[in-house]
Amino acid sequence: MNNARTTTSPARTDVLLRTVVDEISPIGRADDGSTSRLAYSSEERAAHDLLSRRFSDHPSKRFVVHTDAAGNRWITLLGSRPDLPAVLTGSHLDSVPEGGMWDGALGVYAGAVALLQLAERDPLPRSISLIAFASEESPRFAQSAYRFGSRAIAGRVDPADLARLADADGVTLAAAFAALGLEPDRVTEAHVPFDRIHAVLELHIDQGLLLVNAGVSVAAVSAITGSCRLRVTVHGQADHSGAARMRARRDALAAAAELVLAAEIIARADPRDDLVVTVGAIRVEPGSISVVPGLAEFSVDIRSVDADTQNAAQASLREEFDRVSAERGVRVEAVTIRDVAPITMSEQVIQTVMDVLSDQGIAPDRVPSHAGHDTGSFAGHPRLGMLFVRNISGRSHSRDEHIDWADAVRGADVLRESLARLAAETPETAHQEER
Ligand SMILES: [Zn+2]
């Protein structure tokens, strides 16, 4: 009784997507059109609850809904062979303060539509779990709670962070958990071993103009950028801005300024225009108009989708630290606060998505992701994939983020068919396809 033809027409996808978006997207939306649904907030929970309601009541009774110990909402469409590891899809419903309405959310909406449509077909061998990952964005609890939910599933959170991290109001992550009825002490129970996961496929809005420039509405993602972050402290010597002669100075800020420009030169030298290096924060001591700066502390963020490029950039920058130290008589101390390698998506999953793109009349293309995503939490899993939907404005973390509705519908169609193919893979078919 495969009635796929009627249930998965683009018109049907359009109607379902519209319903899901209209239901959930008003949560946390301000009059100016921006969306604020912070990590582990009541707004994020309300969005999770609205999402799951239609699945808990679904007449097919083929869905299992649960919240795991890290507050991720799981909606599983049961397959015919529950012994087989499941296919995961999903993204996040939390946002940055005053963010856009599609970042993260589009992947959840499209996943919900995919599951609703697939539930109208005969069961596939593998279960497919749609996950609204908790706390993908970092603003509320600082960088260390970034992708907290998906990292908890991957077994990659430090439980000590729950007591250590607090928001601007002093609410710890543990207190935020408790306020939502989650038990902070049990967070590690969210872990799902990799051998229970067949593949991960996340749909996300493009956060730049990659798809606009490529002229495609939907594309496979080839790799997720890495990110190497340094905290650099330049120790010079504070002195009188009048009395201290220029040649005798050891000005920490002037040295830092030279290093900021060196970082920019290193990034601009990348012929592929892939590498980006940013100094986004700087602090000067004592910070007075009449004192030569004695100390300057700044951040460096180095990103590339290529591990060698990212590592080489860090090495070149460290050479500059040595050069400027020697030339200016300052001491430069650089601490690596995070070093995440880029993640290449699985060639097999990319191919699955590209085949579906071709079948749906979309020129198959692949683009890198210059931002991090929940999928990155599963680094090391052999079957990871993502697909991007075109962002007309190219803006992100902003209410100006924008998609064409027809592109969102296409994205949902591509996600559904890609998930169906992944969930149809069995150990028996894999043997024939393995290269
Ligand atoms: Zn996102």
Image (tube, rainbow, N blue to C red):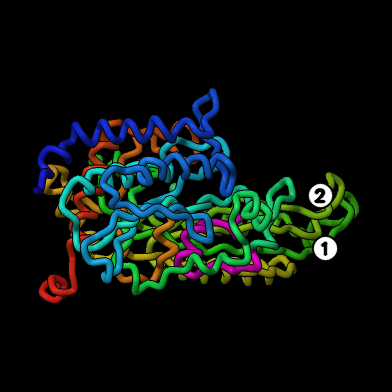
Name the amino acid, label 1: Gln
Residue 246 image point, x, y percent: 80, 56
Task: Find residue 325 and report its image quarter.
Answer: bottom right
Q: Closer to the camera, 328 or 122?
A: 122
Q: Quadrant of the C terminus?
A: bottom left
Residue 349 image point, x, y percent: 24, 62
Q: Residues within 10 Å of mark 2 (few under 14, many from 20)?
A: some
Residue 18 image point, x, y percent: 32, 31
Q: Which mark is residue 184?
A: none
Q: Please indicate whether residue 144 sits to the left or right of residue 293 in the image.
A: left
Name the amino acid, label 2: Gly
Residue visible at 71% across and 64% down? 233
Residue visible at 33% across and 67% down? 197
User: Disc 2 on helix, strand or loop?
Assistant: loop
Q: Is residue 29 magenta?
A: no
Residue visible at 64% across and 54% down? 178
Q: Decide which of tag 1 and tag 2 comes sooner along the chain.
A: 1
Q: Which residue is mark 1?
A: 237
Task: Find residue 10 and report its image quarter.
Answer: top left
Q: Which residue is mark 2?
A: 287
Q: Nearer the viewer, mark 1 or mark 2?
A: 2
- Tell me if residue 66 comes above or below residue 431 in the rendering: above
Residue 133 image point, x, y percent: 46, 53
Q: Which residues are magenta?
A: 142-161
Q: Is residue 156 magenta?
A: yes
Residue visible at 51% across and 40% down? 46
The answer for how far apart the CA atoms under marks 1 and 2 are is 13 Å
